[in-house]
Amino acid sequence: MTRAPQPHPDGSVNCPAIAAAGAAAVQALYAENIAAAARLRACYHLYTVCEDEQERRDLAAGYDPEIDLRPEHAVIDPFHIACAEIVAAYGVHNNRARTLLTRARTLITRFPTLVEAMETGRLDEDTADLLARHMRTVDSAHRGPVQQQIIDWLLAAIAAGTRPGREAILGTLDRIITDHDPAGVRARRAAATRERHIRLRRGTDGMADLTAHLTATEASTLYEVLHRAATEQAT
């Protein structure tokens, strides 16, 4: 009778074949993350080349940026040119090309630390995008230290054998942002509070869609009430 592999206290199984397969999967994941970073840099480089080419054409047509507010001749946005090149090269829809190029421009120019972490293989593109979207309102004066600190924390957690979930990552990021720029956080929260709104759209079969932009505390409270009511109605 063959004895089944015994699990370690951390939940892993002491089996060489499984360990080898797991290591191969990790290496493949690292390679995917590194390739994603390379794609971001390549897409951004494509955009800068298109931008430089359009500037060259403008100057050749007589445009002087020190005198003229804008060229008098027709100009094609370098972003659109780069998108067309991505569509042709990748064979993807224009919307997908715009998403790729927008993400590349955002991460390369505003969040370089995230891209560098991707290039180590340990940060995936989806997590990098999640962090970038959550830091989009952080003032540029604090953006560098904030992204460096959250990456240091996240990579250290991964190296220690843990993988924080979305809520843990964003909760830690919120604390880091508050530590670096408490006045900015208070100002942005006050502005966001003034933009609160709730929309109700009638649907079919006696149903409706409720959309709300609220503070996190208000949204959590409202969610609990609605969830409880929906559960009671379902039973």
Image (cartoon, rainbow, N blue to C red):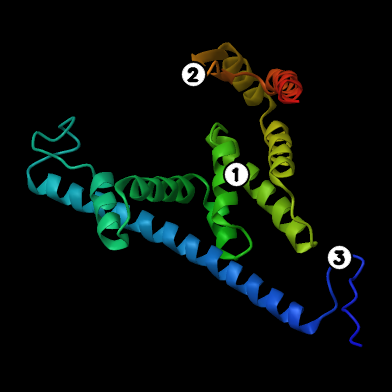
User: Residue drawn at (49%, 19%), measured in percent from left and top?
Assistant: 204
Residue nearer the viewer, 213 or 209: 209
Q: Amino acid at mark 3?
A: Gly
**Location of residue 125 in the rendering, given as x and y in whole percent from the top left corner:** 54, 54
Disc on res. 189: none
- Image quadrant containing the N terminus: bottom right
Q: CA distance from mark 2 to mark 3?
A: 47 Å
Dot 2 or dot 3: first in sequence order is 3
Q: Residues within 10 Å of mark 1 (few under 14, many from 20)?
A: many
- Image quadrant containing the C terminus: top right
Residue 1 seen anywhere in this rendered image of the structure: yes
Dot 3 or dot 1: first in sequence order is 3
User: Residue drawn at (49%, 44%), measured in percent from left and top?
Assistant: 110
Q: Which residue is mark 2?
A: 203
Q: Which residue is mark 3?
A: 11
**Location of residue 132 in the rendering, given as x and y in whole percent from the top left corner:** 55, 43
Residue nearer the viewer, 30 or 223: 223
Residue nearer the viewer, 49 or 122: 122
The answer to which quarter of the image holds residue 16 is bottom right
Q: Amino acid at mark 2?
A: Gly
Q: Going by the image, does 7 lie left or right of 140?
A: right
Disc on res. 131: 1
Q: Going by the image, does 18 lie left or right of 113?
A: right
User: Vertical placement of 71 versus 129: above or below?
Assistant: above
The answer to which quarter of the image holds residue 234 is top right
Residue 195 seen anywhere in this rendered image of the structure: no
User: Vertical placement of 209 versus 165: above or below?
Assistant: above
Q: Residues within 10 Å of mark 2 (few under 14, many from 20)?
A: few
Q: Amino acid at mark 1?
A: Leu
